[in-house]
Image (cartoon, helix red, strand yellow):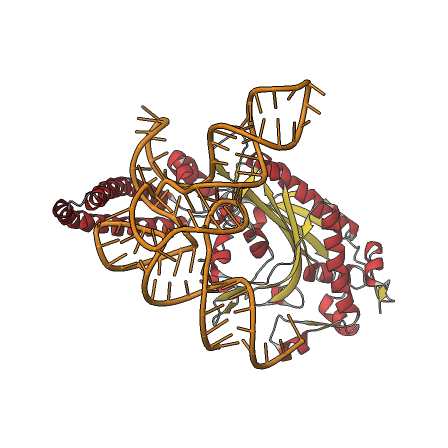
Amino acid sequence: MLTIKFIQENKDFVIDRLSVKKFDGKERIEKIIELDNERKNTQFQLDQKLAQLNTISKEIGSLFQAGKTVEANNARQKTSDLKDEIKVFEQNLAEIEKKITSILVQIPNIPHTSVPIGRGAEDNPIIRSGGIIPQAGSKKFPHWELTDKYKIIDFELGNKLTGAGFPVYKGKGAKLQRALINFFLDEAGKEGYMEVQPPILVNEDSGFGTGQLPDKEGQMYHVGIDNLYLIPTAEVPVTNIYRDVLLNAKDFPVKNTAYTPCFRREAGSYGKDVRGLNRLHQFDKVEIVRLEHPSNSYDALEQMVNYVESLVKKLELPYRIVLLCGGDMGFTSAKTYDFEVYSAGQDKWLEVSSVSNFESYQSNRLKLRFKEDSEKKTQFAHTLNGSALALPRIVAALLENNQTEKGIEIPEILRKYTGFDIID
RNA sequence: GGAAAGAUGGCAGAGUGGUCUAAUGCGGCGGUCUUGAAAACCGUUGGGUGUAACAGCCCCGGGGGUUCGAAUCCCUCUCUUUCCGCCA
C-alpha cells in the first residue's frame, strides 16, 4: 500500500495518477489525510498522559522504598482518573488506525509516469515483437485436439479426479512439463537468480503482504480448517521470505526464482477463453522475484523483460511485448509489461508472462526495508517479479505452432531436457 | 493427537513486580598502539512513532488482563525443544 507520508506530501499527484488507473481516489485520499492528522493529535495526547503516569509510578516506587507508605497511597489515588483518560485515548487511536488501514488497502498503487493512459487491453502499446508467425497454409489444429490425438493431456480424467481446470499430463505431455520447468530454472540460475522451493500453502500474513488479501480473497483456494491459502503464484511465498526483513543497501539486487504449481479459482471466468490449457485452476509456473534499491528498480524491470524475452526467443515462439496502460494494470503494480505468444491453432495471442515493478507498494505491507551504511533512517525496498514462464500457454503455443504431418516438433533447446525430438 | 519445558537485542545468555532508558560475553563499527596486521586497551552498537532539532511515547514470540508500576504475575494463541503415539 501507499505510505501515508507520501500521500500527505503528494496529495494532488496521487489523486491524478490514480485516475490513470481509472480509480477515483479523491474522497478516500482526503479522508486518509484527515484521519492521519487526527491520529497524530490523539497519539500526542495519549503519549503525554502516559508520560504523566510513568512519572507518578516512579514516584510511588521511590516513596514505598523510602517507607513513606501514606504518601505513596495518596499518590496512588491520583492515577485512577489518568488511567480512565488513557483508556479513552487508546480506544480512539485504535479506531482511527483501523479506519486508516481499511481505506489504505483499498487504494491501488499509482502507475509510474511512463505508463500510458488507456482504458483496457486494446490501448496497450506493443513495445517489441519477434519470431515468425506461421503462415496459414496447412490447417492448424487447436491444442485441445492435438493433446487428444497424441494422448498427452487428459482433461476428462482431470474432471473425474478433481474438476474442470485440473488436467492430467501423461507420457510425453508430462515429460514436456518437467523439461520446461528444468529449462526455465536452469536459465534463471544462469541469470543469477537463486533457486528456492517454497511452501505452496501460505498464511494470512503472507497473503496480505503481497496484496492478495484482503480484497482478492475469492481468487485463492482457502483451506478453512487450518486457515491457509493455496498460492496463486510463487510471488506470494517467495516475496514473503523478506517480510519483516531489514536489508543493507549492499545486499541489492536480491534475486530469487522458484518453480511452483499455482492455484486460481478464476471465479467468474467461463466461455471460449477457458478452453483447453488457456485458463486452468492449477498450473505450473517458474517465477522470478527481485528486490531492488529504489534508484535502480526501473533498470531492473527492463533487465527482467530482456531476460523473459530471451526465453521466448530460445523457444522459437512468435511473441510480442506490450506495456500495460493505466486501465489494464493490476492493483499493486506501478508498471507492468505483458508477454504474449502467438498460437497458430487458435489464431490468438496468449499471455504467458507479466513482469511488474511494485515499487514500495508491497514492501510497505511487508515491512521490507533497507538501510544505507551512511544513514540512520530505513527505507522501503522495491519489489519486482515476473513469470519466467507460465507453462500451460507456452505448451499450447508449442503444440499449435510446431505441429507437422509427422507430429509435434520439440524446439532444439528443449531436446536435451525432453530426451525426444517429436511428439507422435 | 497426548505430556512436559521453553520463546529476551546480530548471536549466546542473565534478569521472576519498582534506577531494566535490559547485566555480561561474542560479533559489528570507530579509535589508541603498530611499517601493516593481530593482540591488548578505550569508546560505540536495534526498530517504530514523533520533532525544525530535542524531548516524549511504544517494542523482551502475538493478543488480552491484573497492578500506581510487568521482561517478570494471570489468560489465550502461535512457534520451538524433548518424550509418547501415528506416519511419507
Residue at image x 23%, y 40%? A55
Q: Residue A246 location, x and y as percent?
A: 52, 43
Location of the C terminus of chain A (image quadrant): bottom right
- In the figure, is residue A351 to the left or right of A53? right
For residue A331, say whether it is visible: yes
Viewer-closest of B80 and A10? B80
In the image, residue A160 above or below residue A25: below
For residue A116, say whether it is visible: no
How many numbered marks appear?
0
Q: Residue A81 location, x and y as percent?
A: 15, 49
Residue at image x 24%, y 39%? A48
**Res A420 → quadrant:** bottom right
Residue at image x 75%, y 58%? A182
Q: Residue A108 location, x and y as percent?
A: 46, 48
Viewer-closest of A359 and A24? A359
Q: Residue A164 location, x and y as percent?
A: 61, 73
